[in-house]
Image (cartoon, helix red, strand yellow):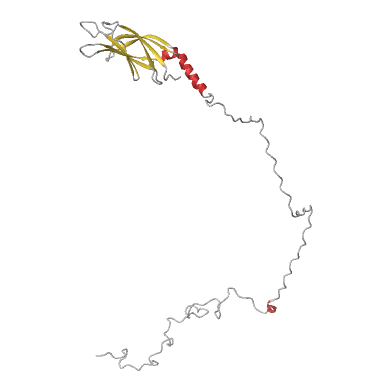
């Protein structure tokens, strides 16, 4: 439950067995209560010594998420700065749950040594917190401040109204198609054409075409260039090829068309 904005009553009654910071006189204690940014100070108990009495009451507005008080006790000095006696932290769980807490809280020095105790009486209105929560819950369904609307809506029916029936299509202007018969007469079968009588080769007038067709004037199959057909057997082919116009084998020296040389084996004579 939220405690935001609710008041906590804190009553500082007094201290007992405080640490004495004076050597020749009695100390003058006072108490400071810290909560968030709120800082409250009691009056100074002059010559209060180790057991001062204050009996002062404070009202502190609470903040959600912060449930702890800080208590500091000081000794007031007129010439020098004030002396720190002790401090403590006071949790608020008990008072926020039961609405009342009457306890004494031990004080400690900065070196975690005992410095006496402080007496606090705290009150909290738990019913106010419950009413605040109840108000938030009822506020979700609060009536509108502008009043009820003048326009009234019909109450919803238990059953939705049936949609209007669909309009039938207009009758066609042309005559409808005849209804098909249960046993329709199949169309008459056409006879297959009789193939022409194939005549034998001499009666058709032309020989069958060869496959594939050959170029005009070329025998089948085509021959290599310059090679007679059919090819000659090995050993009967003239080799090497002869020059144009020269017979094979070459003519003898007596049949040579050239005149004889003056010296055999040398023709024509070498120039000197």
101 vs 205, nearest the viewer: 101
Q: Tell me if 4 is positioned left or right of 168 in this view.
A: left
Quarter of the figure with the C terminus? bottom left
Q: Residue furthest front?
A: 150
Identify the residue at horizontal 68%, vertical 79% (top origin). Answer: 202
Residue 23 picture quarter:
top left
Instruction: Please determine whether, in this image, residue 193 is positioned above or below residue 240.
Output: above
From the top left corner, tell me how far across and down residue 214 is, in percent.
56, 76
From the top left corner, tell me how far across and down residue 87 is, in percent.
30, 13
From the top left corner, tell me how far across and down residue 166 is, in percent.
69, 43
Instruction: Please determine whether, in this image, residue 47 is positioned above or below residue 192.
Output: above
Residue 56 picture quarter:
top left
Q: Count how many numbered circles sit on residues in the image.
A: 0
127 vs 218, nearest the viewer: 127
Q: Tell me if 38 is positioned left or right of 134 in this view.
A: left
From the top left corner, tell me how far across and down residue 145 is, in percent.
52, 25
249 vs 152, nearest the viewer: 152
Identify the residue at horizontal 48%, vertical 17% (top origin). Answer: 131
Q: Tell me if 115 is positioned left or right of 132 in this view.
A: left
Instruction: Please determine whether, in this image, residue 250 is positioned above or below residue 165.
Output: below
């Amino acid at each position: 439950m939220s405690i935001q904005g609710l008041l906590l009553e804190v009553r500082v009654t007094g201290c007992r067995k405080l640490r004495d910071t004076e050597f020749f006189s009695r100390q003058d204690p006072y108490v400071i209560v810290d909560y968030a940014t709120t800082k409250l100070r009691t009056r100074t108990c002059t010559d209060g010594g180790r057991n001062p009495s204050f009996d002062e009451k404070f009202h502190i507005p609470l903040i959600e998420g912060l449930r702890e008080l800080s208590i500091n006790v000081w000794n007031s000095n007129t010439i020098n700065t004030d002396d720190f006696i002790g401090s403590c932290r006071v949790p608020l769980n008990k008072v926020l749950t039961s609405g009342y807490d009457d306890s004494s809280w031990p004080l400690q020095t900065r070196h975690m040594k005992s410095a006496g105790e402080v007496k606090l009486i705290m009150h909290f209105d738990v019913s106010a917190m419950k009413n605040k929560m109840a108000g938030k819950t009822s506020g979700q369904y609060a009536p509108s401040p502008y009043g009820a609307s003048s326009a009234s809506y019909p109450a919803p029916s238990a059953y939705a109204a049936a949609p209007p029936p669909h309009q039938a299509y207009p009758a066609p202007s042309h005559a409808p198609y005849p209804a098909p018969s249960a046993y329709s007469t199949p169309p008459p079968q056409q006879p297959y054409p009789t193939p022409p009588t194939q005549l034998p080769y001499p009666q058709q007038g032309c020989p069958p075409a060869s496959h594939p067709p050959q170029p005009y004037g070329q025998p089948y199959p085509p021959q290599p260039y310059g090679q007679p057909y059919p090819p000659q057997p090995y050993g009967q082919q003239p080799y090497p090829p002869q020059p144009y116009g020269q017979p094979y084998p070459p003519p003898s020296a007596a049949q040579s068309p050239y005149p004889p040389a003056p010296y055999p084996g040398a023709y024509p004579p070498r120039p000197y």
